[in-house]
Image: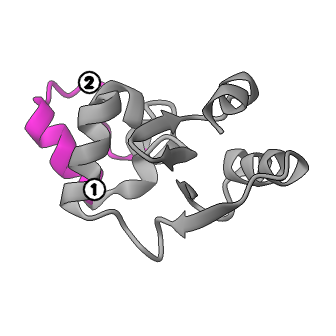
Amino acid sequence: MLKVYGIKNCNKVRDTFKWLEENDVDYEFIDLKKEPLSEGKLDEFVHKVGLDVLINKRGTTYKNLGLKDKDLDEDQLFDLLLENQTMIKRPVLEQDDAVLVGYDEDAFDSFV
């Protein structure tokens, strides 16, 4: 079954729910505020899509942490992302071994 990771009040996540429902796609929602990713699951996502794809550099959390001008290595970024999961670009869709990050209806069509 398709899993959707995100935050319930995120506009992109709500748009994703709407698209999935309009296209009769069953899914399970995992709210990252209530059920944060384990270190292992986050590591799995990073290996599949990369930190650059997974981190929302335009989001509030990234900006509030002042990361734009910091020169952090991947381990430091990973640790920050693990601690601040609201910095994950949303939604994250997972189906079988595939992971898709971000709201993109065309990508949804071929993913689900």
Farthest bottom residue? 34
Q: Tell me residue 84's x, y (percent).
A: 33, 56
- Nearer to us of marks 1 and 2 is 1
Q: Secondary structure at mark 2?
A: loop
Image quadrant of residue 6? bottom right
Left or right of residue 85: residue 16: right
**Picture disc at residue 69:** 2
Query: Relative to residue 90, is residue 29 depicted above or below?
Result: below
Q: Amino acid at mark 1?
A: Lys
In reply to whether residue 70 is colored magenta, the answer given is yes
Q: Position of residue 19 (x, y in %)?
A: 82, 44
Amino acid at the residue labelled 2: Asp
Quick one: label 2, few (<14), some, or many (20+) residues within 10 Å? few
| Vertical arrangement, residue 38 with respect to residue 47, above or below | below
Q: Mark 1 or mark 2, which has the lower sequence index?
A: 1
Horizontal relation, residue 50 to residue 88: left or right: left
Q: Magenta stretch containing residue 41, yes or no?
A: no
> Relative to 13, does residue 68 appear above or below in the rendering?
above
Q: Give how far across and how far down residue 104 sits, in percent.
A: 68, 28
3D distance between C-alphas at marks 1 and 2: 28 Å
Q: Which residue is mark 1?
A: 41
Q: Quadrant of the C terminus?
A: top right
Residue drawn where x is 52% and y is 67% of the image: 30
Q: How many marks?
A: 2
Q: Is residue 95 left or right of residue 106?
A: left
In this orientation, which residue lies closer to the viewer: 37 or 55? 37
Q: Bin the neighbour count of mark 1 within 10 Å (Cα to Cα): few under 14, some 14-19, many 20 and up.
A: few
* Residue extent of the magenta highlight: 64-82
